[in-house]
Image (cartoon, rainbow, N blue to C red):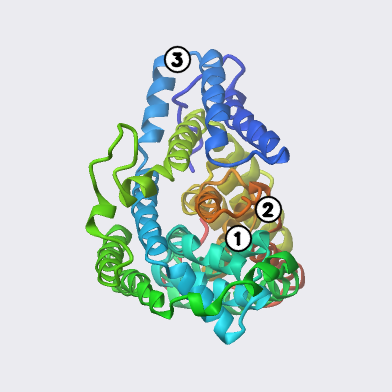
Amino acid sequence: MSEHAPQPKLEFYIGKIGGIVPLFLMISLMLLLTAHGMGGPKGAWAPGFLAILVGLLLVKNKGQYCKSILDGIANKTGVVVITAWMFAAVLGGLMRAGGLVDGILWFGLSTGIQGSAFLIIVFFSNAIFAAGTGSSNGANLALSPILFPAAVMLGADPIWAALALLSGAVFGDNVAPISDVTIVGCATQDADLGQTVKERFPLAVVAGTIALTVLFFFGGSGEAAQVASHVDLDALEPSNLVMLLAVVAVVVTALKGRHLIEALSYGILTAIVVGVGLGKFGISDLFQIPGTRGDSTGLIESAISGVTGAVMFVLILLGIIRIFMDSGLMDSILRAIKNNLGDSRVKSEMIIFFSAAASSLLVSANAPSQLLVGPTIVRPIGEEQNITPERRSNLMSAATCSIFYMMPWCLAVMVWYSAIEASAINSNIQVPSAAISFIAPYPWALFLVFMFSIVTGWRQGAKASAKAPGKPVAS
């Protein structure tokens, strides 16, 4: 890091602290709504909009402020998430129309895998999808519309069914070698990717086991089980499970390294062919000229309209995040942390962990947060304290896969919640509060496992040599 910090793009009448006022105001109002059971992407529109207006009153160079907002909205990460949202929503709508939920319900009732036991299937299904694609967002968007209502109908508590999906997705993303979190973490520390995943896996498995235990013992719902017990098994059609071919198409394509949008597109095409072939819906159900202006043109329009609330939230959030980044406050925070380093390994690993966690909460993204703190804080501390690059990468990954996924205002959590919310509404299930992310089993388990590892030295890995071949040495 250079001795002199770059000049911030935005100047506020109250100093750099003005850069965090819009973000703090939006988060505060969102938490207020969440406390009253009104949280969610659509509810965040007004808080975000008001926050932007307040920031405009505080900033000196208002033209640059407006440009920062537009630059944030045009962020590539946001564009990818929004596009994936639309495609995944269409895929989910088609699979619902094809009766896949009934097919899974038939499977659960026939095999006796119901209640909290079915949440284990939910967890591993989302974990496999996330690990195969390297994306927790992709897993939640693709599978939540199917697995969430099916789990509830099979006797799982709606809250724990939602948390099983979130936990499974985070676990899969955490252990995936192709996850952007893993790749960015290794790149910023010059760590070996294979060794990093190898060292991380036992810690992640312990956390996953804890999460599964919690889901199994607390995930059942007597009321939901009564609903499932009154379902006529003979009325369900096992042939609806053929719609799973659409999910298979997505997973196989993604595992071949194709883009998530391409994979979702093949899933949509497969769902259309299977759905029409089974007679579950016709071509006219996909698109038609409505009889009355304002009515839906079919399944595709209805599916996309269901995610408009989340799309608008992402656009507003990205604009506010860019305001914070352009204020220069983050640079000041990073310098302050670096100037107060300790000389103990435990304290150094704590600084690495919590600086990555704090950065992810401030920018509402996990991989980009590693780009901020990885080279500027984590690497200098790690090299000074002789902490291996793989351990440093794993500390950052754990931080951004634990605390980050507990907070309802973070982008990936909103992706998960929007999918749950839309699925609950479409299935006439009571919508859980967005605040349930605060008790997500796997993020909490991962946090506790790494705290134990930092304090006790369990599975820390070997210390780095002072001049390891191929590894840079602190200057």
Which residue bears the numbered disc 2? Answer: 436
Task: Give the mark nearest the N terminus, 1 or 3.
Answer: 3
Let me know if residue 466 appears in the view.
Answer: no
Q: Nearer the viewer, mark 1 or mark 3?
A: 1
Residue appearing at x 50%, y 50% in the figure:
422
Asked if the residues shown at circle 2 and circle 1 are in contact, with their CB atoms under 8 angstroms apart, the answer is yes
Q: Residues within 10 Å of mark 2 (few under 14, many from 20)?
A: some
Q: Is residue 291 left or right of residue 96?
A: left
Which residue bears the numbered disc 1? Answer: 162
Secondary structure under the numbered disc 2 in the rendered image: helix
Q: Nearer the viewer, mark 3 or mark 2?
A: 2
Nearest the viewer among 346 and 459 is 459
User: Residue 149 at what x, y percent from top left?
Assistant: 55, 63
> Residue flagged by tag 1: what amino acid is it?
Ala
Residue appearing at x 67%, y 74% in the figure:
116
User: Residue 107 at what x, y percent from top left?
Assistant: 51, 80
Secondary structure under the numbered disc 3 in the rendered image: loop
Secondary structure under the numbered disc 1 in the rendered image: helix
Q: Residues within 10 Å of mark 1 (few under 14, many from 20)?
A: many
Distance (Cα) linking label 2 and label 1: 9 Å
Distance (Cα) linking label 1 and label 3: 44 Å
Residue 382 numbered tag: none
Residue 61 numbered tag: 3
Task: Give the mark nearest the N terminus, 3 or 2.
Answer: 3
Nearest the viewer among 161 and 370 is 161
Distance (Cα) linking label 3 and label 2: 40 Å
Task: Give the mark nearest the N terminus, 2 or 1.
Answer: 1
Q: Is residue 255 left or right of residue 193?
A: left
Q: Is residue 119 left or right of residue 471?
A: right
Nearest the viewer among 74 and 31 is 31
> Residue flagged by tag 2: what amino acid is it?
Ile
